[in-house]
Image (cartoon, grey):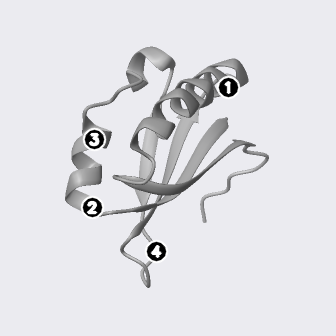
């Protein structure tokens, strides 16, 4: 499994969530199988999004699409974006 991890500060959650739900990269068509939105307990002005893919090429294409979108909203909705493509080596349910 491949994960595209997106991390950034947000101006406010409801405005950010509305933009996220507009789905500017068409996650399903891009190959996203599942996503997770995570917020640190101590910082509600920060989000981490994990987009899961079956194939590396899909994650890289989604990353490139987001790199074209994020500069347009940097400084208003989001701040300090970091993108990482991760390969899940092991996942164990206990």
| Mark 1 surroundings: few (<14), some (14-19) or many (≥20) residues within 10 A | some
**Front position in the image: 36 or 39:** 39
Cβ atoms at labels 4 and 1 below 8 Å apart: no
* Dot 2 or dot 4, earlier in sequence: 2
Which image quadrant for residue 44?
A: bottom left
Write down the residue under mark 1: 60
Marker disc for residue 19: 3
The mark that comes first in sequence, 4 or 1, is 4
**In this rendering, is residue 36 above or below 47?**
above
Label 4 belongs to which residue? 40
Nearer the N terminus, badge 3 or badge 4?
3
The quarter of the picture where the C terminus appears is bottom right
Query: Which residue is farthest right?
Result: 89
* Residue 13 marker: 2
Marks 3/2: CA distance? 10 Å
Query: Do tag 2 and tag 4 residues touch (Cβ < 8 Å)?
Result: no
Does the CB distance between marks 2 and 1 fall below 8 Å? no
- Helix, strand or loop for disc 3: helix
């Amino acid at each position: 499994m491949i994960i595209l991890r997106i991390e950034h500060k947000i101006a406010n959650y409801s405005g950010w969530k509305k933009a996220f739900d507009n789905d500017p990269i068409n996650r399903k068509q891009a190959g996203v199988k599942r996503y997770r939105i995570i917020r640190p307990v101590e910082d509600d002005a920060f989000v981490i999004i994990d987009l899961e893919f079956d194939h590396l090429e899909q994650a890289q294409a989604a990353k490139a699409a987001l790199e074209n979108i994020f500069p347009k909203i940097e400084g208003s909705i989001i701040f300090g974006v970091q993108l990482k493509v991760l390969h899940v080596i092991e996942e164990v349910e206990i």
